[in-house]
Image: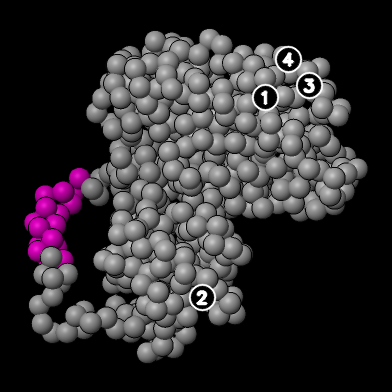
Amino acid sequence: MKPFRYQAPGSVDAAVEAVEPMGVAGQGGAFLAGGTTLIDLMKLHVLTPPSLTDVKNLGLDTIEESDGEVRIGARVTMAQASEHPIFVERAPALSDALWKAASPQLRNVATLGGNVLQRTRCPYFRDNVSPCNKRDPGSGCAAIGGINRLLAVLGTSENCIATYAGDFANALILFDATVETRTDEGSREIAFEDLHVIPEDHPERETILGDDELITGYRFQLPDWARRSVYVKARDRESYAFALASAAVALDLDGDTVREARLGLGGVATVPWRAREAEEFLQGKTVSEDSALEAGRIAFEGAEGYEHNAFKIPLGRQVVAKAILDAARMDLSGAPNSSGTSEGAN
Amino acid sequence: MGHHRDDEQKSAGKPKAGITSPEVTRRGFLGGTATAGATALAGIAGTAQEAVAQEMEAGGSETVDVSLVINGVPVERSLDARTTVLDLLREELDLTGTKVGCNHGQCGACTVLMNGTRVNSCLTLAAMADGARITTIEGVAEGKGELHPMQAAFLEHDGFQCGYCTPGQIVSAIGCVKEGHADSEAEIREYMSGNLCRCGAYKGITEAILEARDATRSSDVGGA
């Protein structure tokens, strides 16, 4: 690691005041939470922040529910959230996306605020040598003509095909969550779906967050039908691997008929991906293998495969179909607390 | 600081074969030559470093004062902010049971318990762990000359071949049980996935955890 200054302010106000501007391509100062991405990339010299502002003394570590609205502090860890009854019982897609990600050691420290900002695993971004528009704007993209098996097929541009690597975000996007942030100017709220931006001409810009903007939490309504939700993740090994293709699905069913469907994709896109056209297709349909596969086909319309990753398109369609069928088959007859009251809040 | 290195070694971990011996050891030899090289360089770089340090005082510091409890022993140090918990254990405290594997949070060889839960010490800055309780492989057994039930079970079930990943596996196995994720073989396999074993001793590791599970639940390890 390059030398850096370290500070751990005692309040959100002090932290957003003290943080050094994050700068182009994230090469300025940085907030430090679990550090599982940041310290890793600092060891590779991919990131060389002159200073770190540790958020460990800021609280923001509770999960609460009131009036049907769930609020998650940004410092809640992946492990803590994956086991919380609100998610386990009433939004299994969120719980599953968390425990199917990373390893127990990483989940014990990685926070939900940091997790959605996890950087890509594109090998050309991480090697610190190859041309990479995300790491070194304007230098080109070594991945497009390189070994691109793990890279994205949706939301790509001629400048970048780096996959968004996280899982939780692909499930959170189902629930129209709001991101709460702070800067030294004050607070703001961002629709979660607007937080990440596709690369287009500026792969170095990954979110709409400002130079000193800190995610403090998320909040969202958790409808009763979120109980019927799953996260299906296809990967090279059964555990502790990034998704080749994943799908988060929540279904509001009337018998076998879909009242409303929500569909998020992971491992295949440059940002957490909401497949709205496939959602619209499912509305009013009877759940069957055919309709599930058709939803998968629609979800990947417009996908562009490259030399080694084109397999993700048929794989992704199958993963979407499996997720829809798995969600539809969930037996919720024994589910406790079907009125959606706030028992089990932290 | 207030601690002499030798005192700390005695109390923080059991004496390790080789380290206390007056004979030349591999680790001592390598450490000695590295120090000699670093001293030669320090003469050139010293002034420039001081200038940089003064310039960077505002908005944080390149050195951090940390205070931790490691295997029950209070430790205070003033460290380069880049120091990880793994660096602190191995380079400052000679607690070399915790291994450096990938050094990027991918293999689990560096697993320690921090406030009772498993973390990768290679990705945890010592500054982030200020105030924490750390338990390493040297601290899992309750008394000298005894093994923790998980250590004994790893021996019994051949939960290793080369042994390099073993300290991390054992600490992680204790954490896995204490965190409540050892109810079935399938759950153990999932919740031990952060510890890789290139020898492929997973079958023995899983059997060891199943056997030591109940005894581990009732064992007192670093407040875990």
- Image x and y of residue A78, in percent: 59, 47
Can you tell which mark lies on residue A280?
4
Which of pointers 3 and 4 indicates the residue nearer the eye? 3
- Residue that numbered label 3 is attached to: A286
Which of these two is toward me, A104 or B122? A104
Quarter that holds the C terminus of chain B: bottom right
Q: For the magenta stretch, what is the residue range?
A: B31-48
Chain to which mark 4 belongs: A
Number of callouts: 4
Relative horizontal placement of residue B39, taking residue A121 as reference (left or right) = left
Which of pointers 2 and 1 indicates the residue nearer the eye? 1
Residues at discs 3 and 4 in contact (Cβ within 8 Å): no
Q: Secondary structure at mark 3?
A: loop
Kind of residue at disc 2: Glu
Q: Residues within 10 Å of mark 4 (few under 14, many from 20)?
A: some
Kind of residue at disc 1: Glu
Callout 2 and callout 1 share a chain = no
- Image x and y of residue B8, in percent: 34, 80
The quarter of the picture where residue B219 lies is: bottom right
- Residue that numbered label 2 is attached to: B211
Q: Does the magenta-highlighted stretch encompass residue B185?
A: no
Which of these two is toward me, B84 or B65? B84
Relative horizontal placement of residue A247, taking residue A138 as reference (left or right) = right
The quarter of the picture where residue B203 lies is: bottom left
- Residue that numbered label 1 is attached to: A289
- Image x and y of residue B206, in percent: 47, 65
